[in-house]
């Protein structure tokens, strides 16, 4: 058998293996997309009926379901046709405000220090290793930590402040790692050029490097918030309430959040709760998409300016 025949056979075998592997990858992607679209369609069809449809009660009377704005501002109820998501929506907004306020300065500051100013020694490498490991810790562990530190030790109680700080601990490693990668992506020539013109290292970092890295840092922050806004386990473990019929008016108020409210609704046996919980999921998805849109706007704005 000639060398040409052997090489041709090897190429054919290699092409066959590549085709099988690509077919397997495409098949996995198609299955994932179809599953996701099926879930979204199911949620939208059920939730749309709850937000915009009419429900018949008995044979004669008919209850008109209000618009989504009323669903957002109405208190919870034991009647699935009257239950609103107002307290949970307000609690989620409170949580996100606290998380952003605490996470961005801490995460960005830690990333800037570790990447730009920290000495390259064993302690720095130890911190970097632990940050990477903390990003993969189960969220339940952070819930137990929040219960021990914020609820009991700090004395904040089962308040929205404790919940926000617990979620801050949850996403802080993700934000720090993403922010450091954004800073690494800035070319060294920018730093060297700024210092060659007489700028100090502090001026070079905060005047040139950080503005160039802000799009990536904002992306990391949004990824962290996207994880935090859908978390249920850490809030339940740190003591968040499942039934709240009032709006939180300060950081020390009791609270619930949209994921907890949806989890509570979907556990009820009546079929009507399925539509109500689906409506809550739609609002949660809308809030998440709004955050991502805002992040894209901020990222594009800074990319144009720099």
Image (cartoon, grey):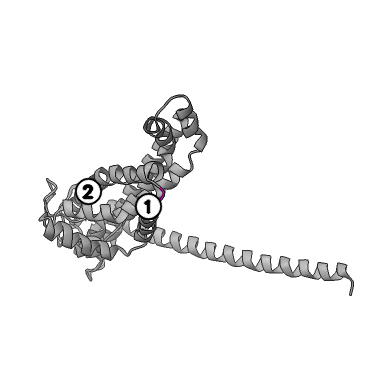
- Where are the magenta residues, as a range? 120-124
Q: Nearer the viewer, mark 2 or mark 1?
A: 1
Q: Residue sitting at 12 percent across and 60 percent down?
A: 152
Q: Main secondary structure of the magenta part?
A: helix
Vertical side of 300 occupied by 4: above or below = below
Depth check: give the residue in front, 141 or 15: 141
- Circle 1 SS class: helix
Q: Residue sitting at 29 percent across and 59 percent down?
A: 231
Q: Quadrant of the N terminus?
A: bottom right
Rounded to the nearest whole Å, what is the CA distance between mark 2 and mark 1? 47 Å
Depth check: give the residue in front, 30 or 65: 30
> In the rendering, at what x and y percent does residue 165 appear?
22, 52
Within 10 Å of the Cα at label 1, are there few (<14), some (14-19), or many (20+) other Cα atoms? Answer: some
Q: Is residue 2 left or right of residue 250?
A: right
Vertical side of 188 occupied by 82: above or below = below
Q: Residue sitting at 82 percent across and 67 percent down?
A: 7
- Any mark on residue 124, and which? 1
> In the rendering, at what x and y percent does residue 168 appear?
26, 52
Quarter of image, res 244: bottom left
Within 10 Å of the Cα at label 2, are there few (<14), some (14-19), or many (20+) other Cα atoms? Answer: some
Residue 26 belongs to magenta span: no
The residue under label 2 is 72
- Circle 2 SS class: helix
Residue 121 belongs to magenta span: yes
Depth check: give the residue in front, 75 or 203: 203
Q: Is residue 182 visible?
A: yes
Q: Is residue 119 left or right of residue 272?
A: right
Q: Residue sitting at 36 percent across and 49 percent down?
A: 176
> In the rendering, at what x and y percent does residue 196 appear?
48, 27
């Amino acid at each position: 058998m000639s060398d040409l025949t052997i090489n041709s056979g090897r190429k054919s075998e290699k092409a066959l293996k590549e085709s099988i592997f690509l077919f397997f990858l495409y098949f996995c992607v198609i299955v994932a997309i179809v599953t996701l679209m099926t879930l979204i369609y199911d949620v939208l069809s059920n939730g749309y009926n709850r937000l915009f449809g009419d429900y018949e009660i008995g044979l004669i009377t008919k209850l008109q379901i209000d618009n989504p704005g009323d669903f957002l501002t109405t208190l919870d109820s034991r009647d699935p046709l009257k239950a609103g998501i107002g307290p949970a929506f307000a609690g989620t907004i409170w949580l996100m405000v606290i998380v952003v306020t605490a996470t961005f300065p801490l995460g960005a500051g830690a990333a800037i220090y570790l990447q730009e100013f920290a000495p390259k020694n064993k302690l720095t490498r130890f911190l970097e290793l632990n940050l990477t490991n903390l990003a993969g810790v189960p969220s339940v562990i952070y819930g137990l930590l929040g219960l021990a530190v914020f609820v009991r030790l700090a004395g904040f109680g089962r308040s929205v402040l404790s919940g926000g700080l617990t979620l801050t601990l949850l996403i802080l490693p993700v934000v720090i790692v993403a922010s450091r990668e954004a800073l690494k992506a800035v070319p060294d020539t920018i730093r060297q050029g700024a210092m060659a013109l007489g700028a100090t290292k502090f001026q070079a970092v905060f005047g040139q490097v950080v503005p160039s890295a802000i799009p990536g840092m904002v992306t990391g922050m949004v990824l962290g918030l996207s994880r935090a806004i859908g978390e249920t386990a850490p809030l339940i473990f740190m003591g968040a309430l499942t039934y709240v019929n009032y709006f939180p008016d300060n950081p020390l108020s009791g609270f619930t959040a949209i994921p907890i409210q949806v989890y509570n609704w979907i556990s009820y046996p009546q079929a009507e709760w399925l539509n109500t919980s689906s409506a809550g999921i739609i609002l949660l998805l809308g809030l998440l998409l709004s955050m991502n849109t805002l992040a894209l706007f901020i990222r594009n704005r800074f990319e144009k300016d720099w």
